[in-house]
Image (cartoon, rainbow, N blue to C red):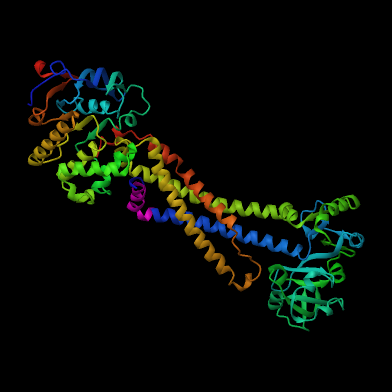
Amino acid sequence: MNGLTSPANNPGRIVVRAEEVWKSYEDGAIRVLNGVDFEAAEGQTIALCGPSGCGKSTLLHLFGGLDDPDRGRITVNGTELNGHRSPLRLLRREVGFVFQLHNLIPDLTLEENCLIPTVAAGIDRKTARARLLQLTERTGVSHRLDQRIQKLSGGERQRTALCRALMNKPRILLADEPTGSLDEKTSSIVFELLLDLVATEGITMVMATHDRALAQRCDRLVEMRDGRVHEPESV
Amino acid sequence: MIFFKLILTNLRRHRIRTFISIAGVAFSVAAMLTVVTVLQGAIGMFSGILSSDSEIIVFERNVSDLFFSNVPAAAVQEVTSWPMVLHADPVLFGVVSSAEHPIITCFGVTPSDARIRKATWLKGNPGDFAQHSDDVVLGERAAEFLVASLGSHVQIGNGTFHVIGILKTANGFEDGGVFMPLGTAQTFFHKEGSSSVITIKLRNKDDATAFKNLVKLEYPNLIGLEDTEFTRSYSQFKILKATAWAVGGCGLLLGGLGVANTMIMSVFTRIREIAIVRVNGFSNLQIAGMIFGESALVSVFGALLGLLIGSCFLFALKFIPALHGYVDVTIEPVVVLIVIVLAFLTGIAGALYPATYAMRIRPVEALRFE
């Protein structure tokens, strides 16, 4: 692990916070989060580990404004999301997402997929293109800009997803099993790239993963169990 | 550009569906254009008959159809003597049938009528008109379908008439009609001493209002209307226009339902894609814009294709001998504009529900399952 730290021993500005957050599905029949308290300081990389269904992805969705908690408070970069009409729009420049299944639009090219967040944010084409070239150079897919997604390998697709997530220079990256669909070797390469980009750009990353080896390369490892988070000391 | 590509991508992805939707709108637009243009043309031609070398039409007040109008000969004589009137021509309309033609329009006119004086006489001499009570002049088309020539006798209704001339006119009704001396027509149609209308040519057009007021004062059961007023207010024309737009509108509504169906399918099949762009920051407005944009493209392409098909169809009508001269297929720009706007609005209306549905898609649920 790159130095296991908590907000207490790395007192940066808190950019992601969950306070006593509860979430359930199917009218309360499936309880996923049971009073979660969580904080992430600026620039930290945090791995959320735990078995399937423990609430890792749900917590990421709440941080990204994709879903609302039943109870409790979510604050991202100083903005409270609870009750906000359009948290996704609010966070479009603050938060980037990377999913396990990359979620790219297959009929568009690599370049067009990456430019989608800039269209949403109203960033001018010249600025967007400069950023695109910078990111694709760094992730090694700049030679595939005009290729459709179907023609890209799994690794290239996930690199593209990574580029897209970082296009608007977000302060926070939410990654849900970002290398879960890749083989071991490619997974390691993509994750190394992810850490490198996050570190260079000073981004806070919260990542859900099953992979303990990857998790231990983050600044913090948080275990999720029974709908609650446990710092390693208490595991 | 990316936004536009997102719209185009879905249309290209489902080419057959897109084509069917465009074709649906196109045929609706073509039907609307054809029906409206043909009826507008028919109305224009009928108006043309009445406004031939005249500015005002006088007819019986509150009649549903000019064929039922009775204007007494005394009124014709009186109006003719008014100083503001250059000439007043009584015209009697009648409809008869012949062996193979259920409808032949007859015009009872005087020799001084512009229809006789100013027409192109293919055969015969205008000076011979109304010399004998059984004389008739045929329009070129009427001469064709009655298989008549100069000097021959033709059976019209219950009477046999002597053809003393054949004339050519651009107006389909006149070209397919029979011109009789007014007195002959009055006897033939049992309307002795009356005509259907008087067409009035004024010495000075500015006297139109004074003339109409005078008609109202002297003949309360008659009404004088300027040609444009008549075209606007004549109930038969109103019914025809309303029918044309209603029939065309129904066609367009069907096209709109097709667009709505297409757009609903479009949204249902791209829920995941909508969720992806939403996660990447697209607002409700941008999501709706994608759906409305797609619908608008289908509608506009459909409208353009429909205009092309409709124009070709109208052009082809000109070459059908039976319709020769009866169908004025001049497409008015305002009709084209209305049809395009209606098609566009129908497309937008068809996308309302799909766009609302798309805006309500929750990305967290849409992305949960592959």
Q: Quadrant of the C terminus of chain A?
A: top left
Highlighted range, magenta = B4-17
Q: Is residue B192 above or below residue A162?
A: below
Q: Is residue B262 above or below residue A162?
A: below
Residue at the spot 17% in from the left edge and 41% down from the top edge:
A159
Q: Is residue B41 visible?
A: yes
> Where residue B54 sits: x, y (%)?
79, 63
Q: Is residue B74 magenta?
A: no
Q: Is residue A102 visible?
A: no
Horizontal side of A22 relative to B60 (left or right) equals left
Q: Is residue B10 magenta?
A: yes
Horizontal side of A173 relative to A116 (left or right) equals left
Quadrant in which residue A215 is drawn: top left
> Where residue B154 sits: x, y (%)?
77, 78
Horizontal side of B290 relative to B337 (left or right) equals left
Q: Is residue B288 above or below residue A88?
A: below
Quadrant in which residue B228 is drawn: bottom right
> Where residue B117 sits: x, y (%)?
80, 73
Looking at this rendering, what residue extends furthest in the bottom direction? B151
> Where residue B172 sits: x, y (%)?
68, 69
Q: How many marks?
A: 0
Q: Quadrant of the N terminus of chain A?
A: top left
Magenta: main secondary structure: helix
Q: Nearer the viewer, residue B164 or A226?
A: B164
Residue at the spot 19% in from the left edge and 37% down from the top edge:
A100
